[in-house]
Image (cartoon, rainbow, N blue to C red):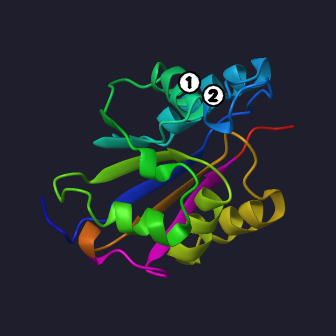
Amino acid sequence: MSVAEPRRIVLFRHAKADWPQVTDHERPLADRGRMEAAEAGRRLTDTGIAFDLALCSTAVRTRETWKLAVQEFPHRPKTVYEERIYEASPGELIALLNQTPDDAQNVLMIGHNPGIQGLADVLAGSGEDDARERMTRRGFPAAAFAVLSFGGTWKSLEPGMATLRDYWAPAE
């Protein structure tokens, strides 16, 4: 695999969570979230990206989102449940991506706001006009995802070096 081939990162916010009397980390998906997670999985499949690796927060709502979304995929990528994604800043998420093995061409990160939206904003030095406009207008609601690409190694990933290629959010 050549580092000249663009790498892709898809930043995926967990679907709509419920608010039962549990710790934030243990919050499950709401009924609407379960439907939106499956829909997001179908939309991720429509991108045509074959993911090599999924990095998923250990929070209940992100694990449930991933479990429902990946059922829509033609093949399941290697999945790593990573506690450092929970409550991470964009800088901490970049540091985590910098540790990604270079044999992973396409990575999906399932996480939380404000970190996921902040990371999309920080990484996207440029973007497809329509995708950037939609992301700016909608923000990053539950179950939204952004597709970014960049050239180089994971270790070289830094702010401003990616291009926002696509953005999707469920209709509310």
Q: Is residue 144 above or below residue 78?
A: below
Q: Quadrant of the C terminus?
A: top right
Q: Which residues are magenta?
A: 156-168
Place of residue 33 in the rendered image (x, y in percent of width and height, measured from the top left): 72, 26
Quadrant position of residue 116: bottom right
Can you tell which mark lies on residue 42?
A: none
Q: Residues within 10 Å of mark 1 (few under 14, many from 20)?
A: some
Quadrant position of residue 151: bottom left
Check disc 1 and report its element: helix, strand or loop.
Answer: helix
Can you tell which mark lies on residue 64?
A: 1
In the image, taking residue 137 as reference, residue 115 lies left or right, namely: left
| Type of the residue with mark 2 | Ala
Q: Nearer the viewer, residue 28 or 122?
A: 28
Q: Nearer the viewer, residue 166 or 105?
A: 105
Q: Are marks 1 and 2 in contact (CB under 8 Å)?
A: yes
Residue at the (67%, 24%) spot, across then down: 28
**In whole angstroms, how far apart are the C-alphas of marks 1 and 2?**
8 Å
Can you tell which mark lies on residue 37?
A: 2
Check disc 2 and report its element: helix, strand or loop.
Answer: helix
| Type of the residue with mark 1 | Glu
For residue 85: magenta?
A: no
